Image (spheres, coloured by chain):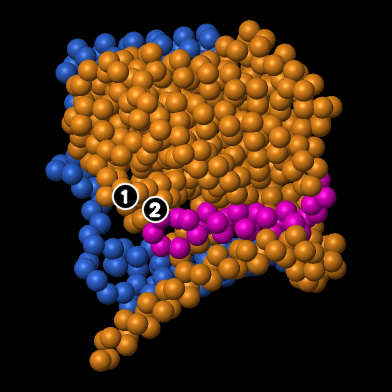
Amino acid sequence: MGYLDSIFLGFAVCLEPTNLFFCFMGVFVGTLIGVLPGVGPVATISMLLPATFKMTPVGAIIMLAGIYYGAMYGGSTTSILVNIPGETASIVTCLDGYQMARRGRAGPALGISAFGSFIAGTAAVLFLTFLAPPLATIAIKFGPPEYFALMVLGLTLLIYLAHGSMIKALMITCVGLLLSFIGLDNISGFERFTYGIATLEDGIGLVPVAMGMFGVGEVLLNIEESVAKRDIFKAKLSNLLPNRQDWKDSAMPILRGTLLGFILGILPGGGHVLASFASYALEKRVSKHADKFGQGAIEGVAGPEAANNAGAGGQFIPLMTLGIPASPVMALMLGALVIFGLQPGPLLISRSPDLFWGVIVSMYIGNIMLLVLNLPLIGMWVRVLRVPYPFLFPLILLFCSIGAYSLSNNKFDVLIMAAFGVIGYLLKKVRFEAAPMLLGLVLGLMMEDSFRQSLIMSGGSFDIFFNRPISASFLLGAIVLLAIPAVRGGKKILAAKLTENE
Amino acid sequence: MKRYDRICALLFLAIAVAAMVLSSYMPMGRTSKPGPGFLPFWVGVILALLSIFLLVESGFRKGPAESVKFLAGEGRWPNVIWTAGSLLGYGFLIEVLGFVISTLILLLFLFRYIGNQKWWIACTGTSLVTLAAFLIFKVGLKVQLPRGFF
């Protein structure tokens, strides 16, 4: 099937009225939760996952994807107007976006971030269209050792990029892996760590854990910190369109941000958060007037905004071609696909072309909807921003609870969610990140299966991971990533000791 | 931070040791055919080593002590416990009292006592949100919600 046929198929699927409606619902909800601080795409997708069980798989994935990239748009609005990032990916946008707003240029800042997001989002979908099928044909040749090595590399990358201590990130990943082992063993059917509790046989679900750590945990933190008074910017938002000079300044940052974001998005463990930070750093470095960054440079808004949207698109590649989720959001997508009986992986594109191309085309259409939602209707979102937190958090908690309960009509999931809410709160206090744990939980069983299959294949020799070029290079990459900070840290300690002795 | 890192290291060490001990009761298998206990055991070993490293490293660490405040924030901290507890309670009660009644109780509690709204606002909010949630999830999305003892 040629690209043209595929894309026509995609349009045919996506233009069905129900799917159009789901796409709109997705980007609408996405923008909404992007604007609301304290509710992220992970918590939202977990909450709405059970609600999609009655939909068609295509409709469900279209909607969930829409929530994800919609949240990338909405997140920037709060960063610019209130200096509160709606999403982690838009933390960087606060730096220059809010400064622009304070200088009376809120309009162009919002405008360029919407246009930048649109351009990058569309470009990412184009890349996805042309890159995913060839990558899937390569991925078909992957055996268990390659899968194992790739997952190790993905986890290592996530650990490497963790803010703060790498040791802590490694530790929390191990805990995630251990959690994933709870339940029936895939290969032998042996019950592990269940102690006769029937609900534990299926293991600890990703969704209640994700909702607990990213939804409930966040609410607990916000309740404790005073519900900060938000200083909402009351400037008139009349001139949303960036002027010619703005465009000239932003064109290259958008282009660079798009490429950077997409590449980082493809890497397992990379993703949109990293992309926005990397793009900001890059723009600051190449800029001729780096001193203006932090004081309302439009490049510092355009680049990162483009990068995080391109990154969001890029993340679909490892999911759709390898079946390996690169981030918690993609892990939830994987969960959704599996619930519908679709196995993400190299065969997904050929087995369910309607799903793959339908979702891709829905992203083109979704990006256009988002532009309309975010520019002319910006006033509405600003009003949403004014909803006070004391009204908001009971809703978040209730929707999380309903979502958890309706996963399998089991109160146990609500309890797991509440428990992990507390765990997430505590971990955040002692600076442990939640994302590596969540990914460990998702990848644990997959890793174990491929690890054990590899050893069975090789008759017990670990050489199998290093004899095969692809798996060897993945593992080498992982080792290098782990070694860099160790060497650096060792040097630092040595230097400290030396100065101490002098 | 240093002190908390040590406490964390010890807690994680305990988890690791527990994982090692518990998985040693499971069939380990051979390397040519690893059993269900194989990976849990070795992940436990790795976690134990990392925890010991953190324990030792935090002992050597110098620098200004960074304080972590649990349950901080001018008398708001009991709210964290109450909120978490109310969710647990909701989980336990939802199948006994049914969706509608337990949701009314949960929301009223959250609006009035955690969110500090006036009574009439809390009551209005509670009833509107419960109604909306019922319409969206039960009627609209046809999610099965427990009816309780009626």
Q: Amino acid at mark 2?
A: Arg
Does the magenta run of residues contain A160?
yes
Task: Name the chief secondary structure element in magenta.
Answer: helix
Q: Is residue A337 magenta?
A: no
Magenta extent: A140-166
Label 1 sits on residue: A290
The location of residue A494, given as percent across then percent down, is: 38, 83
Residue A403: x %, y % from top left: 50, 27
Please report the residue visible at 39 percent of the width from the left and 59 percent of the height from the top: A164
User: Label 2 lies in what chain?
Assistant: A
Q: Secondary structure at mark 1?
A: helix
Q: Where is mark 2, residue-wise?
A: A285
Give left or right: position of A179 versus A133.
Answer: left
Asked whether the beta carbons under mark 1 and mark 2 sit within 8 Å of each other, the answer is yes
When the figure is inspected, residue A183 is found, relative to residue A77, above or below; the finding is below
Query: Would residue A293 appear left or right of A145 to someone viewing this image?
Result: left
